[in-house]
Image (cartoon, rainbow, N blue to C red):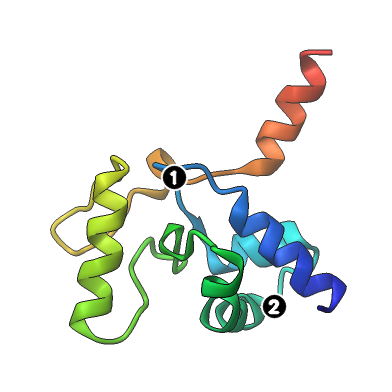
Amino acid sequence: MQPYTARVVEVIKGIPAGTVMTYGQVAAVAGSARAARRVVWVLHSLSEAHNLPWHRVVNAKGEIALPGDEARYTQRAMLEEEGVRFDGDWRVDLAQCGWRPEAREESDQDDR
């Protein structure tokens, strides 16, 4: 596995239940802010093999980006089971439910 791909896998694994990240956020935290499409590839290709919480990744608008109704309903149901709420347009409030590991790292350092 390429180093960047491994970092993407680790970032996705670190998204806590009840929160989401965007494809672009995952790419940036993994070290390449312009690699959101690579994140999509990782989710598509490696989710099952690495038991990734794929459902916790949404697009930049907070929307489910999967094609097909069945996949969209599945992702929404999995997020709602974790307490994530959607508006009438199938959007997650990123300000409320978004996970920001950079902020966590800063607060962890403040606790030392």
| Tag 1 residue | 19
In this orientation, which residue lies closer to the viewer: 111 or 54? 54
How many residues crowd around disc 1 within 10 Å: few (fewer than 14), some, or many (20 or more)?
many
> What is the quadrant of the C terminus in the image?
top right
Q: Are marks 2 and 1 in contact (CB under 8 Å)?
A: no
**For residue 49, which numbered disc appears in the image?**
none
- Report the residue at 52% width, 82% height from top: 44
- Report the residue at 72% width, 56% height from top: 29
Q: Please state which amino acid type lies under the numbered disc 2.
A: Ala
- Report the residue at 61% width, 54% height from top: 13
Q: Position of residue 24 (x, y in %)?
A: 60, 67
Q: Please state which amino acid type lies under the numbered disc 1.
A: Thr
Q: Position of residue 107 (x, y in %)?
A: 71, 24
Q: Position of residue 32 (x, y in %)?
A: 78, 70
Q: Is residue 15 above or below residue 25?
A: above
Counting residues from the start of the chain, the first of labels 2 and 1 encountered is: 1
In this orientation, which residue lies closer to the viewer: 71 or 22? 71
- Report the residue at 25% width, 61% height from top: 76
| Local SS, label 2 | loop
Quarter assignment of residue 55: bottom left
Q: Is residue 104 above or below residue 46?
A: above
Q: Position of residue 88 (x, y in %)?
A: 13, 58
Quarter assignment of residue 19: top left
Q: Is residue 7 left or right of residue 19?
A: right
| Tag 2 residue | 35
How many residues crowd around disc 2 within 10 Å: few (fewer than 14), some, or many (20 or more)?
some
